[in-house]
Image (cartoon, rainbow, N blue to C red):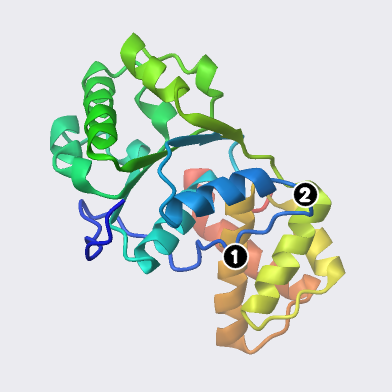
Amino acid sequence: MSTDTPIQLSLGVSLRDDRTFKNFYSADGVNQQVLSAIKGLAEGVNDNLIIWGRRGSGLTHLLQAACHDASNNAFSIQYLPLHDMLGYAAEDVCDGLAHVDLVCIDGIDSICGNRQWERAVFNLFNDIRDAGNCLLFASHTSPPALPILLADLKSRLLSCTVYHVEKLSDDDKRVAMIKRAAARGMEMPQDVARFILNRACRDTSTLFELLDCLDDASLQKQRKLTIPFVKEVLGEKNQGLSHSGDELLV
C-alpha cells in the first residue's frame, strides 16, 4: 500500500461513524483471529481477505471499521456495498479503483449469477492485485458455496485468506448492548437488555438500530431506560413501520 492522501468515498457511499473496531464487541477468544487479520489490512499488511458469517454477525461493521482505520493511517479506501450498487453499471463503479490502497466489497454473494458484475469484479481483482493493493470481501455464504458463474472469479475469491465471523450468543449480545449504551452515556439495566432480547429481532444490526432509537428518545424526553419506557418507544416505532411489515419488535 502507498501512503498517499486518502481519497473521498464516491457513488454516494458513506461510512457510519460508529462502525469502528472500538465499537465491535467480541467475547473473549471469539473472532480474535479475524479481527487481527482485518486490523492488519488497515495497517498496511498486503493480503486479500474474505470474511463470511450469518446475517447479524457484523460483517458490514467490520468492513467499515477497516475503512476508518485505513483512512486514519493515510491509506486511500473505498467501501462498496454491492447490494446497493446493482442498479449501477458494474464497469463504471469499478473504474479507477485499482489504485485504491484498500477496497472493501460488502455482499459479494449479492452479485452471484450477474454476469456483468461478476466480470467487473474479476477484472477489478486482477487490477488491484497487479497494483499491489488489497481487497477485503464480505459474504453471508461460505466462499466455497458461492454460486458464482464465472469460474475464474470463484478461483480468485478462494485464493483469498478466508475467515468465518462467529455470531454473538444472546448473553454476549446483552453485554454488547449494555456496553454500547454506556458509551453513549446511557445506563441500560440488565432487565431492560433482557427485555429487548426477548422481544426484538436478534441480529446485532437491528439491536443497535433499536439502541439508536432509544438514545434519541431518551435525550428528547429526558427519560431513563426502563422497561415501560422501552415499551413506549418501540411501540411508537413499530406503529410507524407497521404498514411495511418491518416491525422492529416482534
Q: Quadrant of residue 89?
A: top left
**Position of 192 compared to 140: left or right?**
right
The answer to which of marks 1 and 2 sits earlier in the sequence is: 1
| Residue farthest toward the bottom in the current orientation of the protein | 222
Residue type at mark 1 is Asn
Q: Is residue 135 above or below residue 110?
A: below
Distance from disc 1 to disc 2, alpha carbons, whole Å, reads 17 Å
From the top left corner, tell me how far across and down residue 249 is, in percent: 66, 53
**Position of 131 compared to 42: left or right?**
left
Residue drawn at point x = 65 percent, y = 83 percent: 185
Residue 29: which disc?
A: 2
On the question of residue 131 being in view, the answer is yes
**Position of 183 compared to 112: left or right?**
right
Residue 33: which disc?
A: none
Residue drawn at point x = 69 percent, y = 81 percent: 186
Q: Nearer the viewer, residue 179 or 50?
A: 50
Q: Nearer the viewer, residue 119 or 246?
A: 119
Q: Quadrant of residue 88?
A: top left
Q: Which element type, helix, strand or loop, lies under badge 1? A: loop
Residue drawn at point x = 63 percent, y = 51 percent: 204
Q: Is residue 37 above or below residue 129?
A: below
Q: Which element type, helix, strand or loop, lies under badge 2? A: loop
Q: Is residue 40 above or below residue 184?
A: above
Residue type at mark 2 is Gly
